Image (cartoon, helix red, strand yellow):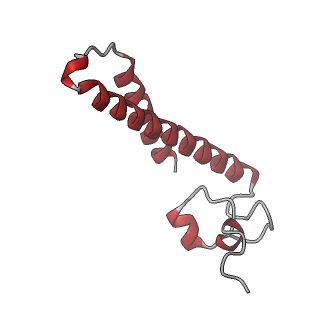
Amino acid sequence: MTRQAVRLEDEAFSLIDDEMGDVQFDDESGEGDTMVVERERDLALSAQARHDIAEIDAALHRISLGSYGYSVQSMKPIPRERLEVIPWSTELVEEKVGGIGRR
């Protein structure tokens, strides 16, 4: 999990660094629209990476407290398969979807 957090943090900072430079373009060339779309995409990816880092940090904190792997809602164990896919999971699938599909 720590390696993943470092990778995401590096990715976020790289995206931010790429966006910090002055961008000059010719309005008539149409490049401005493309640059804006790319910038918006990069900022969204950077925000997602920062969010994921925060989730990983929270999971590492739960490990230190001894509560990792248990639902924050019900304190039931989160299945290993779910934790392998999303190591920072805080809820059971049933809790996350809010009972969708239940009758």
Q: Position of residue 71 (x, y in %)?
A: 73, 64
Q: Quadrant of the C terminus?
A: bottom right
Residue at the limit of the structure toward the right, as seen here: 74
- Counting every numbered tag in the picture gives 0
* Above or below, 20 relative to 88: above
Front-most of 21 and 7? 21
Dividing the picture into quarters, in which one does residue 36 lie? Answer: top left
Q: Is residue 77 left or right of residue 4?
A: right
Q: Is residue 12 above or below residue 1?
A: above
Image x and y of residue 42, in percent: 39, 35
> Which residue does the image show at 50% across and 65% down from the upper left?
85
Q: Nearer the viewer, residue 47 or 39?
A: 39
Q: Residue furthest front?
A: 28
Instruction: Give the residue displayed 27% in from the left and 14% down from the top.
Output: 24
Q: Residue furthest left?
A: 29
Judge whether 4 appears above or below 42 on screen: below
Q: Where residue 82 sits in the image (x, y, percent)?
A: 57, 69
- Quick one: 66 or 81, which is closer to the camera? 81
Q: Is residue 8 left or right of residue 50?
A: left
Observer-nearest of 17 and 67? 17
Position of residue 60 measured from the top left corner of the image (x, y, whole percent):
63, 48
- In the figure, residue 87 lies in which quadrant? bottom right
